[in-house]
Amino acid sequence: MKRKQDKKEKSAAQGALEKAFDKLLSAPAYTNPGAAYMADMENLSVVGDETPATHEQWEQLYEVAKSIRSLEPWDYLHESQRITLLLPGRDEPVYTVVMGSGEMTYGIGVYPGYDSLGRILKMAESEIDESDISAAFEQHCINLYFGDREELESKDRSVIKQLGLKFRGRNEWPYFRSMKPGFMPWYLNHDEAELTIAALQNFAMAFLTYVKQDIKVDFENGETLLRFYDSENDIWYNTVIEMPEEPFIQIKMAVTDELLIARLKKKKKGKANLGFGITYIPVPIQEKKNDRPRIPRMAVLVDMDNGRPIEQAIDEEYESIGDAIIQMFTRYIESNGRPASVAVSGEDDGDYIEDFATKLGIKIVEDERMTALGNMVLNMMDMMESGQFDDFME
């Protein structure tokens, strides 16, 4: 009798998993990658609803934080071993990443969807040096940290005090930060708190299953510990599975102004070799005290023959960074003609100008020298402040 029951439960679990995957593969990111990517980018580029987290949400957040601290998951998992959650009401998986295996920063990262996962994988695979100031502002996740009291801001300590909680010692003080591309790390809003509660609670349940039942997961070969919900039977399942490959989503900036292209194509093509790059300027902009501080982006044109900056355009002064780029190139071409080539540091910067350059017959090349753009911008800012920049540009 028990054998039949076990077989029935196994069949139900398999059926629930198949339904979960069917829903996953019918998500916009799979069926219409371009549209899904554009929608994600539009959502990430604006602040959105910043309704504060409620007292009840903070109670739940710190309750689950205490539970996770007691589990010490960093003793069992490292950063590349993700637990994957299929949460009700979400089209894309939520990935949870454990921090602390290197005994430096302890905590859990919550990565909601393919865009956020792609960003962390890209960061892990890239050789990021100190000159890449943009890397710090490109993450899309919510982090629970366990740090020292000195790491907390007054707002964090105020919440802890209101909840009547006390913490003592190193790496024992929980605090939360929302990481959003183009913004400073900030406090959780209502929606982010709700997601974080669900993600951390289910992470804890999946992790306990992993440890207590000694589940074997071949993380190195694409397996993940998956936790998903069967709404028909009101049951959560934990299983080891090879997740479907994340959809490859890449969108390039397209220039649709045919009159502009026709006008610029008439300009004589010269021998100039330019460099182009985009970087964040580490000067937060905050219009109101409680606003999430935004980090402006700067597009830069450089003369690759002498290394001198030609022009820069900040998105704050235009409709978008794309508009800033097109207007900057247009001004240069109208004054100097079309360049022979434009150097970029990699695909990301190249995606902004590939369509534009192709239509104008300008060659795009990769040049490692453009990877130092961050340092170049910082030096330019120092020169501006000291009054040397105008003399340098002459």
Image: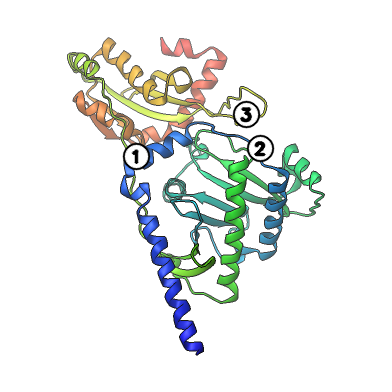
Label of residue 372 in the image = none
- At a point 67% along the width and 26% down the height, the residue shown is 289
Q: Is residue 319 above or below residue 196?
A: above
The foreground one among 277 and 391 is 277
- At a point 45% along the width and 25% down the height, the residue shown is 298
Q: Which residue is mark 3?
A: 291
Q: Amino acid at mark 2?
A: Pro
Whichever of labels 1 and 2 marks the residue nearer the N terminus, that label is 1
Label of residue 52 in the image = 2
Q: Residues within 10 Å of mark 3 (few under 14, many from 20)?
A: few
CB-based contact (under 8 Å), mark 3 and mark 2:
no
Q: Residues within 10 Å of mark 2 (few under 14, many from 20)?
A: some
Q: Position of residue 392 (x, y in %)?
A: 44, 13
Give the secondary structure at mark 1: helix
Whichever of labels 3 and 2 marks the residue nearer the N terminus, that label is 2
Q: Position of residue 329 (x, y in %)?
A: 32, 19
Label of residue 35 in the image = 1
Whichever of labels 3 and 1 marks the residue nearer the N terminus, that label is 1
- At a point 50% along the width and 43% down the height, the residue shown is 140
Q: Amino acid at mark 1?
A: Ala
Q: Position of residue 189 (x, y in %)?
A: 62, 39
